[in-house]
Every structure is written in structure tokens, then in C-alpha cells.
């Protein structure tokens, strides 16, 4: 659906991304993993059309992203960034309603705004937050409200459509992290192409159909979690040994040792 070919990006005399080719596929969760500074967020922004690469091309359904009208692009892909906020005092329900802006001018979809907003709030488990002022919400609550905004944006898109999330679990407690990861699996099961940046490799192993492992702007591996998260490869990337535990995924041995008496 969304494909990147030969992506390069340089800044300050160094390569942020170097010859990266990657594809988002409908019905699949693709996780971008790797250490800090690997280029994960930069790659997500390029795939979303928010940053223009220095070389290479990104296409949506075979058509270069710059050829898409911004409104039409917004109807096909939604982005949830790391830092979510609003510039004006707003209620949570009004933030979710922002997701419907790309559909204004489309009478059939505009007529469904209230339905789409309610469905998105329910899916993100934020219906009870609707009357709250956005400024009074915790970081995790804001993250979930903006997830609902993204879901409202894609309501009516048909398929294929894409959802991109940059470290969406960072502000969430354990229960809401698990709920979000399960939601991403459900969305992919409905045919959505999901791209998510994650630091937690166990979360990546749980949610991903494929993991793209980045290091210093280069794509080292891309495949099923048991392939891309190979302990030997992770040791090379992170500089510490890992062990793969069935049902849990890759575990840093330092953390495992911390749980061992003696």
C-alpha cells in the first residue's frame, strides 16, 4: 500500500537514513524497532509524507506521495506522533472531532461525523473522557484521545488505509499498553495497514507481523519477529546479550539476571 524505495536523508553532514526500502501492507502490523537515533521516527515521517527524503521515493497505491492532494492523503492515512497537544482550549470530544476535518466537503461522510466520533471514542476507550478539558488529561489519557482522533479520521476511508503511530505506548500504564496492542491487532485484522514505532521488544514480538530493525539509519533486518529479533542480531545492535523466551520474546539478560536471586 505505502512503499518506500531507496530512501536517503542527510542532515548536519550525516545520514539519518541510508538506502532504506520498506513496504506497509494492508492487514499487517509492521513495527519499526532499534536503538535511540536509529532513524525510526524519521522513517515514519517520510512514509507519512511529513518529511521529504533527500533521495528515493514513497508511493501510496503506486502514486508518489507529492502527487496526492493533502485532503485525499489525509483520508487514506492517519498519524499519531510522539508528542500530542492542541494549541487552544478544547474538550476531549472536540479533539477527536478534529479527525473528521478531511471529510468536510464530502456530504455522505460529514453526515456520519457524530457516529464516527462516537465509534472512535469507544474503540480507544475514551468515551468517559469526552467532556473533560484536554489540558486536564494525563499524558496517557491525551495519547488515547489522539488515537481516537486518528481512528475517527480513517472512518469512511475504506480499504486499504494506513495508521501510523510513533511510540504510542510510552505514556500508558501496563493495562492500557496491552489494550492498545490488542486494538492494533484487531485493526490489522480488519484490513488496515498499521505501522508502529516501539522500543519495547517484547511488545514488538507480541504485536508485529513483521519487524523492521534499524541501526544508524540502515535497515538491518525486516521479517517475522522471530527472524528480525534474533538474539545475536539484537546483541550486535544494543550491545548486550538477549535470550528469546517462548511467549515473551527477546529478553535482555541483564533484566533477566535482575530477577534471579543471589
Image: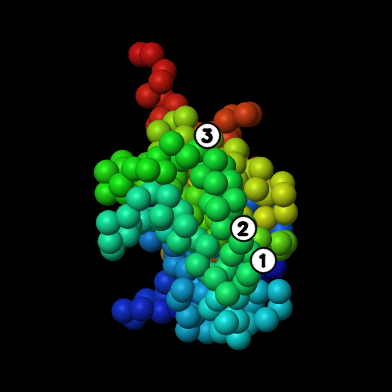
Q: Residues within 10 Å of mark 2 (few under 14, many from 20)?
A: some
Query: Quadrant of residue 186 in the image?
Result: top right
Locate residue 39, reporting x and y percent.
44, 64
State yes or no: discs 1 and 2 in contact (Cβ < 8 Å).
yes
Task: Give the distance between the C-alpha atoms of the residues marked 3 and 1, in whole angstroms.
Answer: 35 Å
Q: Quadrant of the C terminus?
A: top left
Q: Residue, x 41% and y 55% (percent of image)? A: 95
Query: Quadrant of residue 26 in the image?
Result: bottom right
Residue 239 vertical placement versus 99 (above, below): above
Query: Which secondary structure lies at badge 2?
Result: loop
Residue matched to label 3: 178
Residue matched to label 1: 108
In this view, the residue farthest toward the top is 262
The one nearer the camera, 166 or 192, is 192
Q: Residues within 10 Å of mark 1 (few under 14, many from 20)?
A: few
Q: Nearer the viewer, mark 3 or mark 1?
A: 1
Locate residue 206, reporting x and y percent.
60, 38
> Is 137 left or right of 211, judged from the image as shown?
left
The one nearer the camera, 127 or 111, is 111
Q: Residue, x 50% and y 67% (percent of image)? A: 101
The one nearer the camera, 43 or 182, is 182
State yes or no: discs 3 and 1 in contact (Cβ < 8 Å).
no
> Is 212 left or right of 41, judged from the image as shown?
right
Locate residue 181, reporting x and y percent.
56, 40
Q: Residues within 10 Å of mark 3 (few under 14, many from 20)?
A: some
Residue matched to label 2: 112
Q: Quadrant of the N terminus?
A: bottom right
Query: How many numbered callouts?
Result: 3
Task: Give the distance between the C-alpha atoms of the residues marked 2 and 3, in whole angstroms.
Answer: 30 Å
Locate residue 239, reporting x and y percent.
42, 47
Residue 258 vertical placement versus 110 (above, below): above
Amino acid at each position: 500500500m505505502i512503499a518506500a524505495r531507496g530512501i536517503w536523508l542527510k542532515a548536519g553532514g550525516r545520514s539519518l537514513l541510508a538506502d532504506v526500502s520498506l513496504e506497509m501492507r494492508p492487514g499487517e502490523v509492521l513495527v519499526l524497532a532499534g536503538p535511540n537515533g536509529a532513524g525510526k521516527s524519521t522513517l515514519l515521517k517520510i512514509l507519512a509524507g511529513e518529511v521529504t527524503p533527500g533521495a528515493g521515493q514513497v508511493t501510496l497505491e503506486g502514486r508518489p506521495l507529492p502527487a496526492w492532494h493533502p485532503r485525499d492523503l489525509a483520508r487514506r492515512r492517519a498519524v499519531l506522533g510522539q508528542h500530542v497537544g492542541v494549541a487552544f482550549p478544547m474538550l476531549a470530544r472536540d479533539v477527536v472531532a478534529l479527525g473528521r476535518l478531511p471529510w468536510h466537503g464530502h456530504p455522505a461522510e460529514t453526515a456520519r461525523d457524530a457516529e464516527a466520533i462516537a465509534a472512535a471514542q469507544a474503540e480507544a476507550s475514551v468515551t468517559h473522557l469526552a467532556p473533560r478539558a484536554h489540558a486536564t488529561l494525563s499524558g496517557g489519557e491525551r495519547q488515547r484521545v489522539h488515537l481516537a482522533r486518528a481512528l475517527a479520521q480513517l472512518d469512511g476511508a475504506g480499504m486499504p488505509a494506513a495508521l501510523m503511530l510513533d511510540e504510542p505506548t510510552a505514556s500508558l500504564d501496563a493495562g492500557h499498553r496491552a489494550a492498545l496492542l490488542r486494538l492494533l491487532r484487531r485493526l490489522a485484522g480488519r484490513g488496515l495497514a498499521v505501522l508502529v514505532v516501539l522500543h519495547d521488544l517484547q511488545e514488538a514480538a507480541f504485536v508485529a507481523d513483521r519487524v523492521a530493525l534499524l541501526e544508524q539509519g540502515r535497515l538491518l533486518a525486516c521479517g517475522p519477529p522471530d527472524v528480525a529479533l534474533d538474539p545475536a542480531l539484537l546483541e550486535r545492535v544494543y550491545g548486550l546479550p538477549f535470550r528469546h523466551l517462548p511467549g515473551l520474546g527477546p529478553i535482555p539478560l541483564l533484566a533477566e539476571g535482575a530477577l534471579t536471586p543471589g
